[in-house]
Image (cartoon, coloured by chain):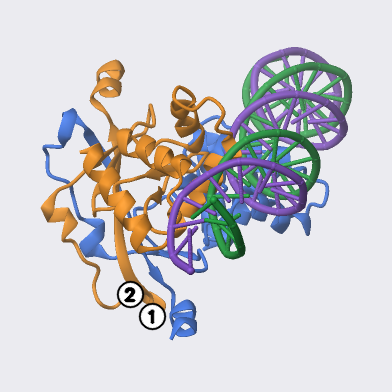
Chain colours: A orange, B blue, C green, D purple
DNA sequence: TCTCATATGATAAATATTAACATATAAGAC
DNA sequence: GTCTTATATGTTAATATTTATCATATGAGA
């Protein structure tokens, strides 16, 4: 699946006139391989192995570029640093309130939920981000 | 309404053996008065007026204490610094993708949405945070 | 291969958050 | 009301996160 995503990445870059550099491809690949919504720092660590010289500020800049181009996105989180997601399809998130683990989940009933057409103050709805917080199996087990 | 919330704050502090200091009360009051999900820095600015000497690190510490005690909460956001909310009742959020403005909204149909009992990997759902992103009226007007 | 607009690497700076510790204060005991 | 003590604050420094600057390097079209 990562291969497929990378192929689409290359194609999107060409189509949108985004210069396709080895660094950008590496950052995207790291995100496609880790769908656990990593922080920039974690992406940088993962890249260290194959690319020891890639500096953190460059990763930040690339991340901003890819977000601006709509190739990856930020994920809303309650704690600290920015979290990233290469999965651009509509999906929901499960967030463990103990360990912070965050996993994707897609359920058709929720994917098709839509807000009423009348929102307060003329707000125009575009996207629906549904976050279900609770306990992952591991943390629930520890608690009992 | 702020008065009512402050009264409940005092009571909660007494009940939970949380030492009721003037600083903590001031921070809570600032949050109760500004339900726009301010950042710590904004809370600090708002307090400057009545309490010019209150240092930012103290505001951070108090915020952490109140979160730990369940008297206020963090709000998930995609961008930058931590955002806070003194509204502990179930509600949804409308987030403008241009100006970042974030407002509360409560709709019974959504408030009562519940996930299916079977979530992946034995995840145990507790809370449902629904974020609707789009355009606020002002930004939608500017765009057209 | 050449050219040039744009991306990177290196460095510094700005912003956000947490830690450490001496002093001050809330809350219960007397 | 005063005393006592555990805990919170203020001060300061440190760390973590993110952004800016600018000389050099490189992708992509000519």
**In screen coordinates, is A130 left or right of B40?**
left
| Residues tagged 2 and 1 counted as in contact (Cβ below 8 A) | yes
Q: Residue at x 24, y 53 (%)?
A: A89
Residue under label 1, please give it. A122
Number of marks drawn: 2
Q: To which chain does the residue with label 2 belong? A: A
Helix, strand or loop at label 1? It is helix
Helix, strand or loop at label 2? It is loop
Label 2 Cα neighbours within 10 Å, binned few <14 / some 14-19 / many ≥20: some
Image location (x, y in percent) of residue C12: 80, 40
Residue A112 appears in which quarter of the rendering?
bottom left
Regarding residue B118, the answer to whether it shows in the image is: yes
**In screen coordinates, is A22 left or right of D13?**
left
Label 1 Cα neighbours within 10 Å, binned few <14 / some 14-19 / many ≥20: few
Residue under label 2, please give it. A119
The quarter in which the C terminus of chain B is drawn is bottom left
Q: Which mark is residue A76?
A: none
| For residue A62, above or below residue B98 | above
Of A129 and B83, nearer the camera is A129
**In screen coordinates, is B46 left or right of A50?**
right
Of A75 and C7, nearer the camera is C7
């Amino acid at each position: 699946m990562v291969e497929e995503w990378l192929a689409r990445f290359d194609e999107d870059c060409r189509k949108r006139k985004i210069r396709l550099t080895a660094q950008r491809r590496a950052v995207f690949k790291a995100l496609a391989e880790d769908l656990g919504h990593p922080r920039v720092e974690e992406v940088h660590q993962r890249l260290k192995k194959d690319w020891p010289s890639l500096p953190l500020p460059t990763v930040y800049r690339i991340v901003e570029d890819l977000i601006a181009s709509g190739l990856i996105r930020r994920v809303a989180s309650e704690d600290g640093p920015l979290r990233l997601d290469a999965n651009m399809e509509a999906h929901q998130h499960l967030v463990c309130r103990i360990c912070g683990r965050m996993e994707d989940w897609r359920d058709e009933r929720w994917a098709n939920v839509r807000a009423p057409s009348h929102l307060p103050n003329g707000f125009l709805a575009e996207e629906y981000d549904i976050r279900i917080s609770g306990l992952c199996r591991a943390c629930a087990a520890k608690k009992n």
